[in-house]
Amino acid sequence: MKILKIGKRLVGENHPCLIIAEIGSNHNHDLAMVKKMIDSAARCGADVVKFQSFRADALIVKKRKVHGKYERNPRWELLNSLELPGSWHKELFEYCSRKNIIFMSSPWDLAAVDLLESLGVGAYKIGSSDLTHHPLLKYIAATGKPIFMSIGMATFDQIDEAIEVIRSEGNDQIALLHCIVNYPPELDTVNLRYIQELTKRYQRPIGYSDHNIENGPSIAAVALGATILEKHITVSREMEGPDHGHAITLRELDQLVADVRAVEMALGTAAYQPGKAEFERIKRARRSAYASVDIEEGTEITMDVIQWLRPGGAIEPKEADRLLGLRAARKIEKYKNITWDDLV
C-alpha cells in the first residue's frame, strides 16, 4: 500500500486520517473571516485548509449565444465573483504556516499551478471536474508533488487514464477521493462501500470528499478505510454563495475532528486479544462451579448439588463433562467454590 507525504505528515494506511477543511469559495472576499476559519481549523486539529485557485476567464465561456446573439454567461458572472484574489495566496500560505496547518489549493489552470509553485505548496488537489483535463494533470504531475484527486462522475477507465497521465511524468504520488458531485447528495447515492473497492483496486490512499451537511457519512467513511477526509466549512450556512449551504460550521468541524479521532482509536487493530482492563474483569464476569447444598464426603457430583455462578474460579462450565460423576474428597460446604482438590 502506497504512503504519501505532505510536509511532515504521512498519509495512508495505518496513519491518522488526513482531515481537509475546505474553505474553497466560501471566503466571500473577507480576508479577516478567512483567517478566522483557518484559526478554527487549526485549533480543532484539522490537518489542511484548502482553497480553489482559478480565474473565471480561464475556466468558463464568458458569453453564450441566446436567441441568435451573444450574452454574458450568468455562470461566468458567478465564478468571477468567487475568485480567490491572487494577492491573497501568499498571505494565506504564510498565515497557515504560522498556524501549523497545511495550505492546499485546487489549481484550475496552468497559471494557477505556477502561482502555487511560487509559494512552495506541498501538494495539489484536483477536483472531480478536471479528472479528464489531461494537460492540466500532466502540468501538475511535473511538479513532483503529491496529488489528491477527486473522482466524482468517473468510470474506472477514466480513473485509470488519469493515473497513467500523472505517472507518465514520473509521479506516482497519487491519492484518490471518492466524491458524489451533487451538493449535497442524497444519502442513498453516497455508496461508501466504494471506498473499500477503490482501496483493493488501487492500493494507494483512498479518501472521501463529503458534501453532506451531516457528519455521519464522514465517520462511516473513516470506519470503512478512508485515510483522507475533505469537508467544506463555513462561518454560517445562511451566507450568500453556492457552497455555504452544503458546508459544515466551524463548531461542526470541531466535532467532526473529535469524532474521527475517536473512531480511529476505537478501530484499533485486527490482531485483537483481550486487553488489561478485560483481563481484570474475567474472574468477575465468568462462572465456575459452586456447591448448591452441603456436599458430604463421597457424594457423587451431579447438577443436583452444584450451580454455575459468578465469580469464576477453578472449574469452568466448559469442564462440566469432566466434573460430573466425580466424588467429593471431603465435605464441601454450601456456597463454596469447588476446586479440583475437593474431588476424587
Image (cartoon, rainbow, N blue to C red):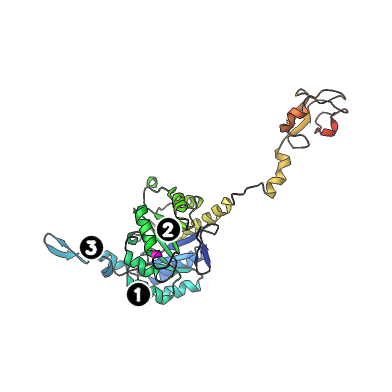
Mark 2 closeness class: few <14, some 14–19, many ≥20 residues within 10 Å: many
In the depicted view, which residue is nearer to us: 12 or 97? 12
Q: Dot 1: what SS? A: helix
Disc 2 vs disc 1: which is toward the camera? 2
Occupied quadrant, residue 117:
bottom left
Numbered mark located on residue 74 in the image = 3
Type of amino acid at the residue the image marks with label 1: Gly
Residue in the picture at 54% in, 52% down: 263
Marks 3 and 2, how far apart in space? 32 Å
| Residue at mark 1 | 86
Find the magenta span and give its range: 166-172
- Secondary structure mostly seen in the magenta stretch: loop
Counting from the top left corner in percent of width and height, residue 149 is at: 40, 61
Counting from the top left corner in percent of width and height, residue 2 is at: 50, 60
Type of amino acid at the residue the image marks with label 3: Pro
Q: Is residue 55 left or right of residue 325?
A: left
> Is residue 178 among what the camera can see?
yes
> Is residue 107 among what the camera can see?
no
Counting from the top left corner in percent of width and height, residue 153 is at: 34, 54
| Residue at mark 2 | 176
